[in-house]
Each structure stands twice: as structure tokens, then as C-alpha cells.
Image: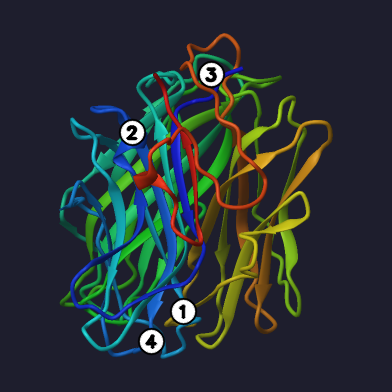
């Protein structure tokens, strides 16, 4: 069996940076990419800073050049650096030739320090083992567009599946310029069949803290689709009231990936999802709000991602989330992170992902867990998505397989010293010859 090409970097240790210039904190090494290769980037981190009056910055670079549409500027809710918000960027890119490093960077203001924890960086190879229009679909919109009180559709994917009842994972990304803090942004993630709206969930409702903010938001959900209708997935944005100012759409993307067939493997050897819209209000201890069971035929790497909507209901309530692999909390050594909203009407989407080895020979439970600091604040619209990186036997495959130790710092296909991981950083790489 062979694996799809991928690069994965995880830096779990807390990072702090006071410099007013961007400083690199995590790196996907150029040597693990193919020159000119096409990749889907999926980058998340929990970010903030230690001064609620300062705008902190987070961005990506490709080969030392700022990667367009990746910069997030955020003002923390308060001075508690443990209260963080989420940075997410998802986009299809073409690597440079020769290939270059992709780096995650952050900055303070020269005195106050930016904070980032649990930096997760994935690059999934698209142009060798996966076929656009069959295994995946992608669209983006980079128009700078003022929002109004009427919903406007931006990035949108539409297709009729070749086969009936295949399972698909849909990943959304939005970058929003906050021009006004007295109204809320509504980011809806709409699903239509034959142009008839079926759902707008998960929906992200956010009020900015400062007019200098630029927010990088995300959502995701799994679907099982028939092949008798055209299905559309799109990002729809609007402001909730009319004022002299407005928020602005800067960038959005939709990535739809087939993770399984109706009755067995298709593209990947294993893939599944669970979606539950019903409310639950976990308090006092972590509660499992979504779970999947995977029984691998072969020990190998799995991509696991969770997403939920939190009805905050109070601007003093915090929420924490984490993944658990076969009973073990991930990432090891970090119990959780907290997010607190600026307005009691906020309904933010939270998401987190990781790539981890699962052993063959038994069913492996995968859990999305949440803790809310006080009563109320129900969890809504939660999704858990999982797929192997192992391809089905009939798929064209690269020469090398990936395998992943279950403990410690790890590095794949890297013989030279310059690619040695730094302390606290776990690196997983899958490459093709």
C-alpha cells in the first residue's frame, strides 16, 4: 500500500514574540516539497498576545516572501495570554521552482508579545495521486468586497458526483477586514442541491474587537452526496445591520475532498465523518461531543479534524476543545486552550486538526472534546472528519511509503542535518520520487 504525498509540521510548545518585525516560528522545509508541485495548505494555530490594546500579527511566507491573503491582525480580548483566538488559512498553492520553505511567522509591537500555541501545518499533494474533478474540487475568491446586510456568495464549488453516496469532507476558509466593531459578521457555509438551499451550517457569527483587525476564519463539515443532483458548497457573507461603515471580504476558499465510497474505500483506504446539529452544554469537565471509530488494516497516518459552533451567550465565558486519539489527548502535554469572545451574541466556529499514527489490529476511537467554563453556551453543529493518507490499491502511487512512530519527535525522508526538527516540533513528511 502507498500513501498520498504530504508534509506535516506540528509545533505544540507555546511561542512568544515581542519583535515588531515578523519572526519565523515553524517551518515546512523546501526539501520535502517537489518543485512546481500543487498542494492544499491547511494551517491552524491558537493565537493572541499579552496586551489588549495592541494589534498582534500572524502570517505565512513562501521562500521569504509574504504569502498573499495569509496575514491575520488581532487584538486580544484581555491581557490573559491563555485566552486565545484561532488562526486558520486554507488555500491551494503551486510550489516555487526550486521549492522553497513555507514558514509560520508572528510579531508583537516591540514591547508586548504575541503568543501562538499548537501550530499545525499540513500540505496535501494534489497533482500526483489525486485528480481534480474526481477526488477533489477547489475554488477561491480574492475580491476585496464591502459587505452589506444582504448575503453575498463568494468562493463556490459545484459538481455532480460520479458515484452515488460517496462521503466528502468540505473545508472553508475566510479572511475578513474588520472596519466596524458595533456589528457582527455572519459567515454562512451553504450547501445546495440543484440550486435549492439545504443548509447554511456551520455558521460563524463574529464581532471584531478593533477596526484594525483582519480575521482568518474557517469551518468544515462532512456530507454524503447522491449522484442525481448538482451539489454546491459556497461561502456567503453579510453584516447584521446597516451602518456608515462595513466589514470587507478579502479572501475565501472551498476545498471538497472525497474521503470514502458509499460501501468502502475510495481514494483513501479509510475515511469517515460524523455531523450532529443538536445542542449540548458541557460544563465542569471535558465532554465528548463527537466520536468516530476507525479500524486500520495497516498501521499508518490518519488526518483527523474537528469543528464545532459555540453559542457563547456571554462575553465572560471561555470554551476549550481538544482531540483524543484512542484515549490519548492530543497534543500530548497540552490539555487544552481557551477562546473567549468579544460579544455575547457571538457564535464562533472552532476547529482543530492533527495527523497521527493509528495502529492496526483493533478499532481506534477518535474523539472531539469540549469544556465550557460556565453553564449555558451550548455546543452546536459539530463535525469530526478522519481519513487515512494510505491510498486504495488501484490509485497511482508514489514510490515511498510513510510510516509514523507513535511517540516522540519524528522526521521522514530527511537525511541531512539542516532538516532536523527543533525542540517541541514534530515533523511528518510524505514525499514522492
Q: CA distance from mark 1 to mark 2?
A: 38 Å
* Label 2 or label 4, whichever comes before in sequence order: 2
Q: Quadrant of the C terminus?
A: top left
Q: CA distance from mark 2 to mark 4?
A: 36 Å
Q: Residue at x 35, y 73 (%)?
A: 184
Chosen colour scheme: rainbow
At numbered mark 3, what does the secondary structure look like: helix, strand or loop? loop
In this view of the protein, which residue sits in the foreground, 325 or 256?
325
Q: CA distance from mark 1 to mark 3?
A: 40 Å
Q: Quadrant of residue 387?
A: top right
Q: Residues within 10 Å of mark 2 (few under 14, many from 20)?
A: many
Residue denoted by label 3: 227
Residue 197 visible in image: no
Q: Residue at x 71, y 71 (%)?
A: 281
Q: Earlier in the sequence, mark 3 or mark 4?
A: 4
Of marks 1 and 3, which one's residue comes earlier in the chain? 3
Q: Is residue 420 left or right of residue 199?
A: left
The residue that mark 4 highlights is 50
Amino acid at each position: 500500500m502507498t500513501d498520498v504525498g504530504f508534509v506535516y509540521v506540528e509545533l505544540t510548545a507555546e511561542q512568544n514574540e515581542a519583535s515588531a518585525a515578523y519572526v519565523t516560528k515553524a517551518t515546512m522545509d523546501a526539501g520535502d516539497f517537489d518543485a512546481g508541485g500543487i498542494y492544499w495548505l491547511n494551517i491552524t494555530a491558537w493565537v493572541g498576545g499579552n496586551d489588549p490594546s495592541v494589534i498582534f500579527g500572524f502570517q505565512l511566507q513562501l521562500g521569504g516572501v509574504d504569502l498573499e491573503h495569509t496575514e491575520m491582525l488581532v487584538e486580544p480580548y484581555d491581557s490573559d495570554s491563555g485566552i486565545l483566538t484561532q488562526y486558520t488559512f486554507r488555500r491551494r498553492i503551486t510550489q516555487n521552482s526550486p521549492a522553497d520553505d513555507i514558514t509560520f511567522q508572528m510579531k508583537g509591537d516591540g514591547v508586548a508579545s504575541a503568543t501562538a500555541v499548537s501550530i499545525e501545518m499540513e500540505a496535501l499533494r494534489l497533482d500526483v495521486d489525486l485528480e481534480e474533478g474526481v477526488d477533489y474540487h477547489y475554488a477561491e475568491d480574492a475580491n476585496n468586497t464591502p459587505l452589506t446586510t444582504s448575503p453575498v456568495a463568494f468562493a463556490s464549488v459545484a459538481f455532480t458526483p460520479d458515484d452515488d453516496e460517496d462521503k466528502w469532507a468540505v473545508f472553508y476558509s475566510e479572511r475578513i477586514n474588520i472596519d466596524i466593531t458595533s456589528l457582527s459578521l455572519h459567515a454562512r457555509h451553504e450547501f445546495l442541491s440543484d440550486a435549492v438551499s439545504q443548509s447554511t451550517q456551520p455558521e460563524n457569527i463574529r464581532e471584531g474587537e478593533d477596526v484594525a483587525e483582519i480575521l482568518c476564519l474557517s469551518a468544515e463539515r462532512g456530507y454524503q452526496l447522491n449522484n442525481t443532483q448538482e451539489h454546491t458548497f459556497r461561502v456567503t457573507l453579510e453584516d447584521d445591520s446597516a451602518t456608515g461603515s462595513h466589514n470587507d471580504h478579502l479572501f475565501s476558499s472551498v476545498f471538497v475532498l472525497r474521503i470514502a465510497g458509499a460501501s468502502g474505500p475510495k481514494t483513501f483506504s479509510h475515511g469517515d465523518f460524523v455531523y450532529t446539529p443538536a445542542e449540548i452544554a458541557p460544563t465542569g469537565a471535558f465532554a465528548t461531543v463527537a466520536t468516530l471509530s476507525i479500524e486500520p488494516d495497516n498501521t499508518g497516518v490518519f488526518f483527523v479534524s474537528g469543528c464545532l459552533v459555540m453559542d457563547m451567550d456571554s462575553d465572560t465565558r471561555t470554551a476549550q476543545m481538544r482531540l483524543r486519539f484512542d484515549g490519548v489527548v492530543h497534543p500530548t502535554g497540552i490539555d487544552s486552550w481557551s477562546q473567549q469572545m468579544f460579544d455575547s451574541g457571538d457564535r464562533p466556529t472552532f476547529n482543530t486538526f492533527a495527523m497521527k499514527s493509528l495502529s492496526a489490529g483493533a478499532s481506534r476511537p477518535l474523539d472531539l472534546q469540549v469544556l465550557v467554563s460556565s453553564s449555558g453556551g451550548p455546543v452546536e453543529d459539530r463535525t469530526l472528519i478522519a481519513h487515512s493518507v494510505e491510498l486504495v490499491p488501484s490509485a497511482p502511487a508514489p514510490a515511498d511509503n510513510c510510516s509514523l512512530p507513535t511517540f516522540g519527535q519524528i522526521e521522514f525522508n530527511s537525511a541531512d542535518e539542516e532538516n532536523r526538527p527543533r525542540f517541541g516540533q514534530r515533523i511528518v513528511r510524505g514525499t514522492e520520487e
